[in-house]
Image (cartoon, helix red, strand yellow):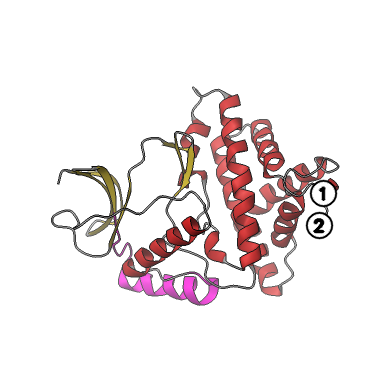
């Protein structure tokens, strides 16, 4: 099988790779999972991620199993995530956990948002296409109390534009602790808005216009505001401490989570009074 490297990360002695493999049926992506950190750093990260943050396993086999389970779960709910495919054997010389995925020809939404050659109207159209399904996924996560329906590393870098499809990928780490799903929805919103900010650069007017397009197309402003406010004004004393630490750590970041969420709350507030696209309720009020 002819193989080429699409992406590589990790330590010089142990790379995690994303490979393009040519098969008789066409190209396939093979994601190879490897230990990206030293043993000591892995243990420390595992304690932080699994014990305190409530995330899934961080080892190679754990990440592979989490990604496969999340992809199956997203597909079960009709969400467009990268599809798993059958491959009889991995490329020659590849050892350790791996997963075969569909090959998509396109670009990430982040790349398109940053590309000055792409008209702004086209970028806003893509954001408006993304938002309704984003809102539906959030509603599913809240209703099912299923944090695995949320992207632990939310960013437009992990949304692939392939024709008419907007495909989510990179689900190898997931939130697994139930009971604070609405808060995690707010965290995911903040992560995507930070990505939107970075793609918009220093032009705050451009960021605000893109944010307004997202909020309007998202539709359910009650759900949006509830999630945003769960992070801005957390009820848990522990989360308040985490929020304070984060504000201090990122006090110079123009797109720090609290800043983008405050803007998200403001923009949603200016849009109240219009019927929500999904709920039909005015003023973003809960039913």
Residue 239 versus residue 250: which sits nearer the camera?
A: 239
Q: Could you tell me which residue is drawn at 60 percent across and 58 percent down?
A: 249
Does the magenta-highlighted stretch encompass residue 181?
no
Cα separation between marks 2 and 1: 8 Å
Q: Could you tell me which residue is drawn at 28 percent across and 62 percent down?
A: 34
Q: Quadrant of residue 233?
A: bottom right
Residue 60 versus residue 279: which sits nearer the camera?
A: 279
Q: Quadrant of residue 195?
A: top right
Relative image position of residue 94 (x, y in whole percent)? 18, 58
Q: Could you tell me which residue is drawn at 73 percent across and 43 percent down?
A: 277
Callouts 2 and 1 close, C-beta under 8 Å? yes
Tally of numbered discs: 2
The secondary structure that most of the magenta stretch takes on is: helix
Is residue 2 shown to the viewer in this render? yes
- Residue under label 2, please give it: 286
Q: Quadrant of residue 96?
A: bottom left
Determine whether 234 is above or below 19 in the image.
below
For mark 1, give the secondary structure: loop
Determine whether 93 is above or below 59 in the image.
above
Relative image position of residue 20 (x, y in whole percent)? 25, 44
Relative image position of residue 242 (x, y in whole percent)? 63, 67
Magenta span of residues: 31-55
Relative image position of residue 254 (x, y in whole percent)? 63, 44
Left or right: 22 with respect to 277? left
- Residue under label 1, please give it: 281
Q: Could you tell me which residue is drawn at 52 percent across and 66 percent down?
A: 175
């Amino acid at each position: 099988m002819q193989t080429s490297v699409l992406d590589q990360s990790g330590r010089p002695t142990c790379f995690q790779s994303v490979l393009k493999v040519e098969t008789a049926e066409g190209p396939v992506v093979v994601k190879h999972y490897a230990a990206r950190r030293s043993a000591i750093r892995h243990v420390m990260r595992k304690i932080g991620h699994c014990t305190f943050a409530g995330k899934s396993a961080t080892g190679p086999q754990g990440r592979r199993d989490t990604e496969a389970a999340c992809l199956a779960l997203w597909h079960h709910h009709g969400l467009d995530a990268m599809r798993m495919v059958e491959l009889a054997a991995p490329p020659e010389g590849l050892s350790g956990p791996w997963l075969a995925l569909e090959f998509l020809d396109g670009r990430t939404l982040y790349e398109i948002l940053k590309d000055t050659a792409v008209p702004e109207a086209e970028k806003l159209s893509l954001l408006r296409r993304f938002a309704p399904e984003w809102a539906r996924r959030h509603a599913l996560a809240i209703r099912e109390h299923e944090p695995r329906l949320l992207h632990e590393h939310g960013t437009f870098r992990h949304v692939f534009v392939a024709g008419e499809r907007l495909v989510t990928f990179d689900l190898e780490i997931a939130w697994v602790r139930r009971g604070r799903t609405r808060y995690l929805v707010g965290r995911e919103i903040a992560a995507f808005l930070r990505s939107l900010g970075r793609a918009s650069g220093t032009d705050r007017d451009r960021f605000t216009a893109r944010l307004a397009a997202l909020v309007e197309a998202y539709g359910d402003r009650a759900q949006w505001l509830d999630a945003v406010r769960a992070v801005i004004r957390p009820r848990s004393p522990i989360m308040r401490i985490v929020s304070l630490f984060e504000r201090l750590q990122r006090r110079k970041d123009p797109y720090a989570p609290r800043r983008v969420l405050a803007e998200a709350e403001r923009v949603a507030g200016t849009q109240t009074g219009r019927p929500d696209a999904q709920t039909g309720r005015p003023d973003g009020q809960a039913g």
